[in-house]
Image (cartoon, rainbow, N blue to C red):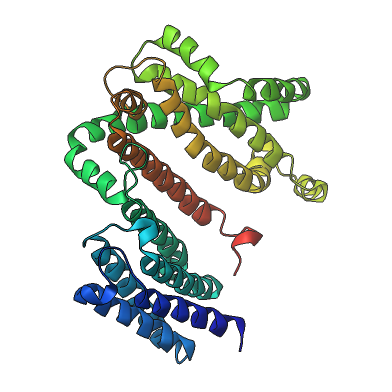
Amino acid sequence: MNASRRTYLIAIILMAAGLMVPAGGASWMANTAAFAFALIACAGAVLCLWPRSFAVDHVAAAVGLIAGAAGTLILLGGPGPFGMQAPGLWLFVAGWTLFLWQRLDVLARSTGHGVAALLAPGLFGLALLYLWQVVVTGFAVPQVLLPSPSQVATVLGNRADILWPDFRQTFMKAVLAGFAIGNAAGFVTAMIADRIAFLKRGVLPLCNLASAMPIVGIAPIMVMWFGFDWQSKAAVVTVVTFFPMLVNTLAGLASVDAMQRDLMHSYGASFGQTFAKLRLPSALPFVFNALKVNSTLALIAAIVAEFFGSPILGLGFRISTEVAKLNVDVVWAAIAVAALAGSVFYGAIAAIERVCTFWHPSYRG
């Protein structure tokens, strides 16, 4: 028996064992809907035990995993208590997790492209949300310690009237402005430093010194210089993103092979032609690497800067004020908005990188 089949078999045994032992205030069989979905999950795992075609296995696994998740959530909506008094629930969840683990491994090993390549990370993210919901609900974790994803989603819907202006203030004003200015300034400075030897030697030690400066030290100074509105946060983002772009661009421009330079020189290429056709393309992977690092760094910097003075808007302001009121669900909703915005921003830059550097060896099939 190979490792894959052994994993499915253990998952089936755990799920079946879970259905046999107590699961909180009522057994699985007392909750007809939950029990039916749990049986479908077991059947899906059994079908995957003997592989057929790739499509049939995927459909069986998808139906089984969705049914198992639905059955668990239906059971948790019934009479408790759960927690340590529901071993059947946790045995079933352990088997379901093992089932999912094996399917994610299959998906990750497949050579899909486009949407298919996003299936494994997407399912992994959804599984984490599901397990978060099950653990918080099953163990009745107080909302003030850790709200469930459903509670956070409810706040996102009900408090959109305050979260949207916060997002606009932090991301669309401070982050985007500071990101554009910081990266453009870093790129232009790197081009100048690359042409002037003493500047190149002097800039790098200065970068090491400046990159060690803490955001909490820069933010109050920028608030005093530029005021409480988004301009001071954009200034912090500019400072934070400037040096990674400068260092990466310098490294990218220096990565050109000496033989390639000699070849361009032998063709009689001017400085502009050498830069546009050789040095800039060679530096692009480094530049995009800096942009991706800065995309998340900028959001963190803007949110931290809002802790040191802000109008009554902004994700950082919302987090600091709502945590003082113990409205932890609103705090988590603001964190979710920031995380989602950062992920989408990073993904957009990665997509543009793929288009602009399609020739790079890392993207060759």
**Corner quadrant of residue 276:** top right
* Above-or-below relation of 234 to 27: above
For the residue pair 169 and 121, the one nearer the viewer reads as: 121
Horizontal side of residue 121 vs 362, given as left or right: left
Q: Nearer the viewer, residue 155 or 30?
A: 30
Q: Is residue 202 visible?
A: yes
Q: Residue furthest top?
A: 224
Q: Splitting the image into 4 quarters, where does residue 180 fall?
A: top left
Q: In the figure, is residue 61 to the left or right of 296?
A: left
Picture quadrant of residue 193:
top right
Residue 77 locus on image (x, y percent): 22, 60
Residue 121 position in % (x across, y down): 46, 61
Residue visible at 51% across and 79% down in the picture: 10
- Report the side of 197 relative to 43 (left or right): right
Q: Position of residue 249 (x, y in %)?
A: 64, 36
Counting every numbered tag in the picture gives 0
| Residue in the image at 40% along x and 61% along y | 127
Residue located 44% across and 62% down the image = 124
Q: Is residue 315 above or below residue 58?
A: above
Q: Quadrant of the C terminus?
A: bottom right
**Dividing the image into 4 quarters, which one contains the N terminus?**
bottom right
At x 37%, y 45%, the residue is 340
x then y, percent, for residue 29: 25, 77
Up the image or down, 37 lies above or below 180; here it is below
Q: Decide which of 210, 134 is in the foreground and name it.
A: 134
Q: Residue 185: in sight, yes or no? A: no
